[in-house]
Amino acid sequence: MEKETYISDFNRDSIHTILLNNKEDEIEELFKMALNTRQEHCGSYINLRGIIEYSNICKKDCYYCGIRKDNGYVKRYQLTEDEVIASAYQALENGLGSIVIQSGEQSSKEFILTIDRLIQKIKKLSNNKLGITLSCGEQSEETYRRWFESGAHRYLLRIETSNEALYKKLHPDNLHHSYFARKNALEAIKKTGYQTGSGVMIGVPFQTPEHLAEDLLFLRDFDVDMVGMGPYVEEQNTPLYLYSAGLPSLQQRFVLSMKMIALLRLMMPNINIAASTALDAVNKEGRFEALKAGANVLMPNLTPAKHMQNYSLYNGKTRLSDNCQSLLNEAARFASSAGDKLRFNQWGDSRHYLLRTNKHEEVLK
Ligand code: SAH
């Protein structure tokens, strides 16, 4: 396939064609082009964030998710403030310049104030050295603003799918799970001033390659600064598990996810793209492979070991309780084979965001 086919003209049809193309040499070529594009536009390094899974308590009932409210098999937990602080220190000790605080969705006053306090404490204890990304679901504009003013500067809210009809099949049909509310929340995040991240699940029941092509166009048209997307991995105690038989194999979902990452890199050369954890549920070096196909962010898990297994979004996630240091060593080895280095002690902001907000001098750093 000619380079121009990829670069010049991304539309529903051309993306669809590439997603369906299974010629191995052409897929390899796509990955190589994505790696080159990432190195040219974002540099030859991998940004690091330590992810802290704050709580698996969730008010939502998404049909695919292992920590949905109605899943009675989950042992619910919420980290104490001291546990979060200890994880933040661990990030500093390991040279991770940023953390992500992710959580099941809650909207109580207490939750909002606790997250707020944690942001302020972490900024203070690290002398502003740790960047903070939040991934705590749909909140009011006021809450997004409060957390932003306290020092969080990136927010990830996956749209999950950009197709409203498909969204309805993956979620209960009620006000709590509205496609438009989610999209509005994403807009509010951007308006507040965050580096704004979104993403989708790849290979969910009822999803077609056309949906995935539309997802990439959605992310481009929304002008996101960062993306986390990865394969759907079925989880036993969820309603969607009933539809597992008709799914593409896990390996097929993995390749599809890699292609989505590579394509998005070509479409949006200077955004941050995470090598999402779900890639490892399919292939134990999945995340590293994604770093060679356009991704540029790796997120070692810093959730305290005793709780990690309870943040069970999907089957097989628990066996990923990797030790941060050994993950970093492995990642460094992989990265160097592609001419990349891990980037320690830096926030690792999205260049796309810096340019879109006219912070050109920061880009040169
Ligand atoms: N409450 C937060 C965080 C949700 S969990 C929010 O709404 O943003 C983080 C992500 O895990 C979700 O956005 C979803 O895309 C992903 N996820 C959930 N269940 C999954 C599954 N079975 N397979 C793969 N990814 C899943």
Image (cartoon, rainbow, N blue to C red):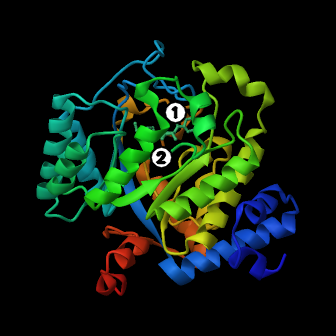
Residue at disc 2, CB closer than 8 Å to ligand 1: yes
The disc placed on residue 318 is 1
Q: Position of residue 252 (x, y in %)?
A: 77, 46
Q: Residue at x 21, y 55 (%)?
A: 148
Q: In the image, which disc is placed on residue 158? A: 2
Q: Quadrant of residue 364?
A: bottom left
Nearest the viewer among 237 and 19 is 19
Which residue is drawn at the image coordinates 26% and 57% (left, top)?
A: 192
N-terminal of the pair, mark 1 or mark 2, is 2
Q: Are marks 1 and 2 in contact (CB under 8 Å)?
A: no
The amino acid beneath tag 1 is Thr
Residue 216 got which mark?
none
Tell me if I can see residue 330 in this picture: no
**Is 271 drawn above or below residue 135 in the view shown?**
below
Image spot of residue 189 (x, y percent): 33, 53
Q: Residue drawn at (77%, 65%), measured in percent from left and top?
A: 14
In what quadrant of the picture does the N terminus appear? bottom right
Q: Residue at x 38, y 79 (%)?
A: 355
Residue 270 in the image: state x and y as whole percent: 49, 74
Q: Secondary structure at mark 1?
A: helix
Q: For the residues marked 1 and 2, what is the alpha-carbon distance in whole angstroms?
A: 21 Å
Instruction: Determine the secondary structure under disc 2.
Output: loop
